[in-house]
Amino acid sequence: MTLLTTWPDAGPDTLLRRTDDAAGIAAVLAPAGVRFERWPVRSGVPAGAPAGSVLAAYAPEVGRLTAEEGFATVDVAALHPDGSPGWAAKAAAARERFLAEHTHEDDEVRFFVAGAGVFYLHVDGLVHAVRCERGDLLGVPRGTRHWFDMGTVPSFTAIRFFHGPDGWAASFTGSGIASRFPSFDELRAGRAA
């Protein structure tokens, strides 16, 4: 379930908001310049579908957003349990890369084709945890402090949009704020505060 949870940035002891209403989520995030949309879910696109099939299935939406926002690069990122040797270590390393608060020189725009992940947005004294799932598009404006958690057993496919050819590049803030808030797994288990 798509879910927005908001706390003061001092910590998660005070729950300020918890909603699964898509229109409400979009309205709360819009003043921070964050784009939240629900796109139609295409049947026949399994979690492990090749990138070309994913992009073909969502070509109308990808084309519209690319034209509106001037994106130069669009790709597909996916990580799903496959039982291969070393998968757990690969997943843990991928997860660790995104867990610290950081910013980007480009917008971070993701559309979830399958699976889920939580974007934590640190804006104006608040932390908004946005649990994105299949059908959710989230656009985080450049310079916005945030982090991302895909859980201890990551399973997601996402279309990524970039204005430049360099893709994902982060500037880490050095803050330990991310460690003070519930993780993807804790939110999924209902431990939001």
Image: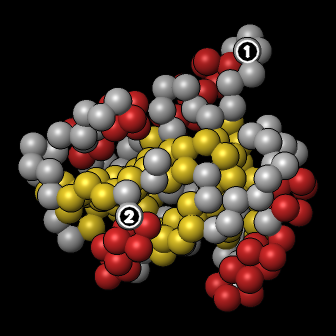
Q: Position of residue 188 (x, y in %)?
A: 39, 35
Label 2 Cα neighbours within 10 Å, binned few <14 / some 14-19 / many ≥20: few
In this rendering, which labeled residue sits more in front, label 2 or label 1? 2
Instruction: Give the quarter of the image for residue 21.
Output: bottom left
Q: Is residue 187 left or right of residue 55?
A: left
Q: Of the residues shown, which amino acid type is indicated by label 1?
A: Gly
Q: Is residue 55 above or below residue 69?
A: above
**Secondary element at tag 1:** loop
Using the image as rendered, state which of residue 2 and residue 82 is in the foreground.
Answer: 2
Residue 142 showing in the rendered view: no
Tell me what residue is drawn at x 21 percent, y 71 percent.
124
Compared with 137, 6 (above or below) is: above
- The answer to whether residue 4 is left or right of residue 165 is left
On residue 21, the disc is 2
| Between 164 and 186, the one nearer to me in the picture | 186
The mark that comes first in sequence, 2 or 1, is 2
| 36 lies left or right of 70 | left
Cα distance in 3D space between marks 2 and 1: 35 Å
Q: Residue at x 25, y 33 (%)?
A: 191
Q: Which mark is residue 83?
A: 1
- Residue depicted at x 53% and y 71%: 37
Q: Residue at left 46%, top 48%? A: 1
| Element type at mark 2 | loop
